[in-house]
Amino acid sequence: MEQVINGMDLDKLEAFRSALKENPVVLGLEAKGVWEGHSGRSTVHIGPYKLGDQHIDRQTRHYTIPYGAWREVEEAVGFVGPTDRVEPVEMALGAVAACLVNSIALNAPRHNINLEGLEIDVHSDIDPSVLFEVRGPEDHASCMPKITTEVRVKGDISDAQLKEIENLVHYSPVHGMVEYPNITETHVSKV
């Protein structure tokens, strides 16, 4: 008998989890940023990905996102023709929030947590000194010293379930990418 909670078939979820234990799947993800010829502005394209050895590329998976800064900041920096655009750090914070929603909502039913609502706020203050080469890359941590996350759940939730939800935060891949050190590799070439 199919058990669907919050739009998810729990039997299929458990089958997927069992398969992951026996044969881990790797998702190959990528994003491509293209400079628009105007300092501080770029367009990012997100599209194909890999699910294990399978390359998946379909038009409905092609996303284009314009990046920049806020009009007031662009004016202060000296941009000609300032405009409002989403700022990359905001998108990173948004990605943390979205992934936390997924991590909690995906796993809550397995822990008998009946969510009626879920909201997550992610906040950080940022000092742009490293971006403008006023300080060196070794100062990144001091330029954004703290990211605060507030998780609000709605429903008949016990204190023990609140603790479990707090634990589920740490299973979010994007939260983990921000919380824990990761190996990054950069290659620069001429085209």
Image: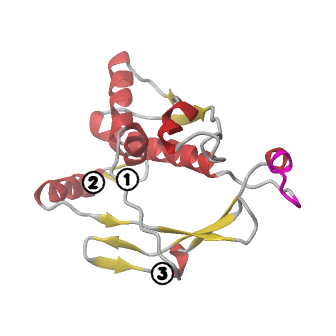
Is label 3 in a helix, a strand or a loop?
loop
Q: CA distance from mark 3 to mark 2?
A: 24 Å
Q: Position of residue 127 (x, y in %)?
A: 64, 35
The residue beneath circle 2 is 13
Q: CA distance from mark 1 to mark 3?
A: 23 Å
Answer with left or right where residue 104 lies relative to residue 12.
right
Q: From the viewer's perspective, tell me whether residue 126 is left or right of residue 115.
A: right
Residue at the disc numbered 1: 8
Going 56% across and 43% down the picture, which residue do you hit? Answer: 93
Q: Amino acid at mark 3?
A: Arg
Is disc 1 in contact with disc 3, using a CB cutoff of under 8 Å? no
Which label is found at residue 58?
A: 3
**Cβ atoms under marks 2 and 1 closer than 8 Å:** yes
Q: Residues within 10 Å of mark 1 (few under 14, many from 20)?
A: some
Q: Nearer the viewer, residue 104 or 63?
A: 63
In the image, residue 51 sits, relative to residue 117, either above or below, namely below
Q: Is residue 79 magenta?
A: yes
Q: Is residue 78 visible?
A: yes
Q: In which quarter of the view is residue 37 placed?
A: bottom right
Q: Most extreme residue toward the right, as rendered? A: 81
Q: Residue, x 78% and y 48% (percent of image)?
A: 70
Q: Tell me which segment is drawn in magenta.
A: 74-81
